[in-house]
Image (spheres, rainbow, N blue to C red):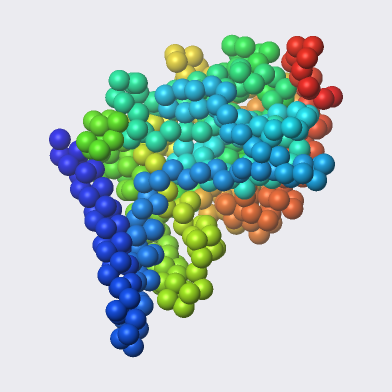
């Protein structure tokens, strides 16, 4: 019960700060105060506006915001985000561009489950929509999933990916970003043994900790500095009474956000101070650079306790995937069984979260794959975010990934006669 009280205490503090911001903004905006030449009222209104928005965003799932897409005909076509498979802990969604012929490349973008929503990959999705049919793993917030739905750990995550790959078929190109890279590699190997015909055409792993010990960073080395007992005692709480998942053991998003912010407290503090000044001067807008970034950055989700703890223990501490000792549903996965899926790794030279060396380790594990089906790329000057969403991704990495897909494409599954599939 004490864990539930702690969870509710965090939510109470968040809610109180949101209320304080709204109250300050409303009070300082009374027309009569405009007659008093005191900048304190302008500052108070600006502080309230920024504070209310900041704490409100922490419990809001961001919208994809991809409503239209300009096609080759020069017209804007509506984009529908439709669910292909719906599961308790995550859905497989498709970004369908209405009125456009089906594109020759089918891409499954595996989003990380590391405290933020899949919408963190919004710009990645937009860049791939140009000439791909894009599917994304849309993971759910654990606080909204009833306890009756059961557990969800790294093995369940892997089996979800297996089902998603089976649904899309062997002509799929899988792109895993950051945290899911090792588990996506394991899912592909699982398919190689249990259902070879369902394997994807290509697998691109971007900035993921396949072998965290290859080049340790402060983030990936965290599991070495604490015991599992310490993690469970200090990081795990029960969802409070406000949400559908009441009683579920989780690693709260608000707790992880506090950790994120503390790592760069000075930079974040300056960003919010500058934003308050911009609001005071009337230079801020609803979609300015600050709000675009922090609306996404502050929107956090809870992870199930078993997923968080098993990730730390099995991927980082025991290095089960790096040692090719990973077990899924009682089956020992052998990554060396991957013989027909082209694998490419992408790393950023300045990545301080998953440093160069951690992701390319996947190629050494693919002992059954010929060198002709292996590729790697290290992007000079790129940090973690830049290798999948920044200029480095758009200008350099994305074209390389598309070329890799084209070189290793499989024929699509046969469609009905009335299909609009193009060759």
Q: Confirm whether residue 65 shows in the render.
A: yes
Q: Quadrant of the C terminus?
A: top right
Q: Residue furthest right?
A: 423
| Quarter location, residue 342 | top right
| Quarter location, residue 165 | top right
Q: Is residue 212 left or right of residue 34?
A: right
Classify 272 as above or below 9. Answer: below
Q: Quadrant of the N terminus?
A: top left
Q: Is residue 15 left or right of residue 71?
A: left
Please state the horizontal and vertical placement of residue 257, each as a whole percent of the image: 37, 51
Q: Is residue 224 left or right of residue 97?
A: left
Please state the horizontal and vertical placement of residue 315, each as a whole percent of the image: 46, 34
Compare residues 146 and 387 and report the one nearer the observer. Answer: 146
Q: Is residue 249 left or right of residue 121?
A: left
Compare residues 191 and 85 and report the one nearer the observer. Answer: 85
Q: Residue furthest left?
A: 1
Q: Confirm whether residue 322 shows in the render.
A: no
Classify 144 as above or below 278. Answer: above
Please state the horizontal and vertical placement of residue 6, each as a whole percent of the image: 20, 44
Classify 55 as above or below 240. Answer: below
| Quarter location, residue 289 | bottom right
Please state the horizontal and vertical placement of residue 360, each as a whole percent of the image: 63, 40
Q: Residue furthest bottom?
A: 37
Q: Residue at x 64, y 54 (%)?
A: 390
């Amino acid at each position: 019960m004490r864990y539930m009280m702690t969870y509710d205490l965090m939510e109470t503090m968040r809610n109180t700060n949101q209320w304080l911001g709204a109250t300050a903004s409303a009070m300082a905006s009374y027309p009569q105060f405009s007659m008093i030449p005191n900048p304190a009222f302008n500052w108070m209104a600006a502080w309230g506006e920024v504070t209310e928005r900041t704490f409100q965003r922490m419990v809001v799932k961001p919208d994809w915001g991809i409503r239209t897409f300009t096609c080759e005909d020069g017209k804007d076509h509506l984009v529908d985000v439709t669910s292909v498979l719906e599961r308790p802990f995550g859905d497989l969604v498709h970004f369908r561009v209405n009125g456009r012929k089906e594109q020759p490349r089918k891409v499954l973008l595996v989003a990380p489950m590391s405290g933020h929503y899949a919408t963190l990959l919004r710009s990645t999705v937009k860049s791939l929509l140009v000439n791909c049919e894009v599917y994304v793993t849309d993971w759910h917030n654990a606080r909204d999933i009833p306890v009756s739905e059961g557990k969800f750990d790294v093995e369940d995550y892997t089996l979800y990916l297996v089902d998603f790959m089976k649904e899309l078929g062997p002509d799929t190109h899988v792109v895993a970003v950051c945290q899911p890279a090792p588990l996506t590699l394991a899912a592909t190997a699982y398919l190689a043994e249990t259902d070879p015909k369902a394997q994807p055409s290509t697998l691109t792993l971007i900035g993921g900790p396949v072998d965290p010990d290859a080049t340790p960073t402060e983030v990936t080395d965290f599991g070495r500095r604490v015991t599992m007992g310490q993690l469970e005692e200090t990081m795990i709480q029960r969802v409070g009474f406000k949400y559908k998942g009441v009683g579920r053991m989780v690693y709260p998003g608000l707790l992880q956000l506090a950790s994120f912010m503390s790592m760069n407290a000075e930079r974040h503090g300056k960003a919010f101070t500058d934003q308050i000044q911009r609001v005071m001067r009337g230079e801020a807008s609803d979609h300015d650079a600050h709000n675009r970034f922090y609306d996404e950055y502050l929107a956090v989700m809870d992870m199930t306790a078993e997923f968080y703890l098993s990730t730390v223990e099995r991927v980082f501490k025991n290095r089960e995937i790096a040692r090719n000792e990973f077990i899924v549903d009682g089956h020992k996965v052998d990554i060396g069984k991957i013989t027909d899926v082209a694998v490419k790794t992408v790393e950023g030279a300045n990545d301080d979260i998953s440093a160069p060396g951690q992701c390319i380790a996947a190629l050494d594990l693919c002992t059954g794959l010929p060198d002709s089906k292996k590729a790697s790329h290290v992007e000079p000057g790129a940090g973690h975010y830049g290798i999948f969403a920044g200029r480095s991704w758009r200008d350099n990495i994305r074209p390389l990934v598309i070329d890799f897909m084209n070189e290793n494409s499989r024929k699509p599954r046969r469609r009905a006669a009335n299909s609009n599939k193009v060759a």
